[in-house]
Image (spheres, helix red, strand yellow):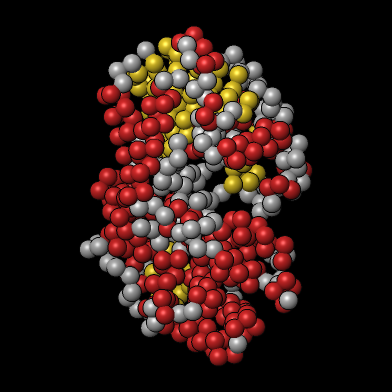
Amino acid sequence: MADKRVKSARAVAVQVLNRCDPEKNYAGPVLDKLLHRTEQRQRATDLVFGTLRNRRAIDTVIATFSGRPVQRISPHLLNIIRVGVYELVYAPATEEYAIVNEAVEYANAVTGRKQAGFVNAVLRQILRHISNRQVPIEQADAIRTLPHALTTGCEFDTDFLPDRQDFPDGYLSTVFSLPGWLVTDWLGEFGEGRAGQFCAASNRRPSIYVRPNLLKTTVQELADKLAADNIETEIIEGAMIKLKSPKAVSKLPGFAEGEFTVQDITASQPVRLLGPRPGWTILDLCAAPGVKTTQLAEATGDAARIFATDIDSNRLDLVRENTTRLGIRSVDLMPYQEIQDSQFSTPNSKFDAVLLDVPCSNTGVLARRVEARYRVTPKAVQALTEIQGELLRAASEMIRPCGRICYSTCSIQRCENSGLVGDFLVENKAFELELEKIILPSTDGPDRDGGYTAILVKK
């Protein structure tokens, strides 16, 4: 019964991590069910995703300085220790005694005194080896320092990381908790400097951006409305608003009225590059949850004819929720199997445009979709490219002459992007590439996710 009276953000974070295997399920839905147990919701959220985002580095610290591999630590104790190490390394403003004491108290409450003693011993042993919790990166020894921001890191008194000069793949994958094969792939394609930047961007705390619904408001009006509620904002590229004040999005002024949608800057690019126009007949082939579907409607003044479908018909309910909240009327939901219906079977009745935001490896959005790093493998990417190719071929059969396909991913893997599109164009001479654009994960200026867009035109 004590579990239901939890008030500590740390305790809630541990409970979420105990129930979440990032290789199999997502932390977000579990966190949503438990957040009501603490008044420190923002902090609990940071502890959950910060621990998951940096888990490989955290486990390296635990194994190195406790002398015990994490596989030999009870999972429930392990997550208490992981959260404690996350705060010691990545939250230098938090007092050390508070981190250790609360971890020990919680372990004592849920597992007993003996196990609490083990947690205390491990965290204090790690703490003894931390020489500086916040040291400027340029002054630190790289083989001893875990970066926790662009310019600062946590330095230990012992060499425990791979040497970056000799083993750049091992260093980057350990420090930024990323799959080794993926880092090797980025090093081969982009070089060490840029690959290192992508790794750092993949481990940032991502900012939250919103896309104003221009059917109901303007960018400036929405920014002013948020400011009136003491929400600090920044207008980005004249079209998006960055939220700088932590607050539940659903509680912000204008959300219930449908005046904005949460969307990253990079994710907003495909529809902008497509340039949909009023009067077009448009198909969104992989529509759920409907963020880009509603962007199509807003970009056309709600004056296009938009069909939204998804292979998972249950997820179309999310599209319906979004269109309803935003007050959009130009979107018709359609079961996936009905897309090949007779109304689209003749050249004169096919689509002016197909938006094809395909399922992908998510390698451009690892900071935001934290669990993806635990699931992405070369085999999984290969399977995805086969699905992507099938969807692109299907879309090509639904386009009228001079029609356009907007193919997009949130991946930065060549095989899912320019490689796949290039192979399609070789096999389909009726199409030509109008433009393509890849945006790479970045921490410079507005922090961005990565993603790819190609516009294909039927001759």
Q: Position of residue 95 (x, y in %)?
A: 59, 76
Q: Residue furthest top?
A: 348
Q: Is residue 357 left or right of residue 387?
A: right
Q: Is residue 125 left or right of residue 99?
A: left
| Quadrant that contains the C terminus | top left
Say which residue appears at 45% left-offset and 53% top-offset.
Answer: 372
Residue closer to the observer: 206 or 327: 327
User: Does residue 67 appear anywhere in the picture?
Assistant: yes
Q: Position of residue 3 (x, y in %)?
A: 69, 74
Residue closer to the observer: 136 or 39: 39
Say which residue appears at 42% left-offset and 42% top-offset.
Answer: 360
Q: Is residue 380 left or right of residue 27?
A: left
Question: How many marks can you see?
Answer: 0
Say which residue appears at 38% left-offset and 58% top-offset.
Answer: 178
User: Does residue 444 appear anywhere in the picture?
Assistant: no
Can you say whether 31 is above or below 324 in the image? below
Q: Quadrant of residue 31?
A: bottom right
| Quadrant that contains the N terminus | bottom right
Q: Quadrant of residue 259?
A: top right
Q: Position of residue 127 (x, y in %)?
A: 48, 81
Residue closer to the observer: 5 or 307: 307
Can you say whether 2 is above or below 315 in the image? below
Say which residue appears at 59% left-offset and 13% top-offset.
Answer: 279
Can you say whether 207 is above or below 334 in the image? below
Can you say whether 228 is above or below 41 in the image? above
Q: Position of residue 139 (x, y in %)?
A: 38, 67
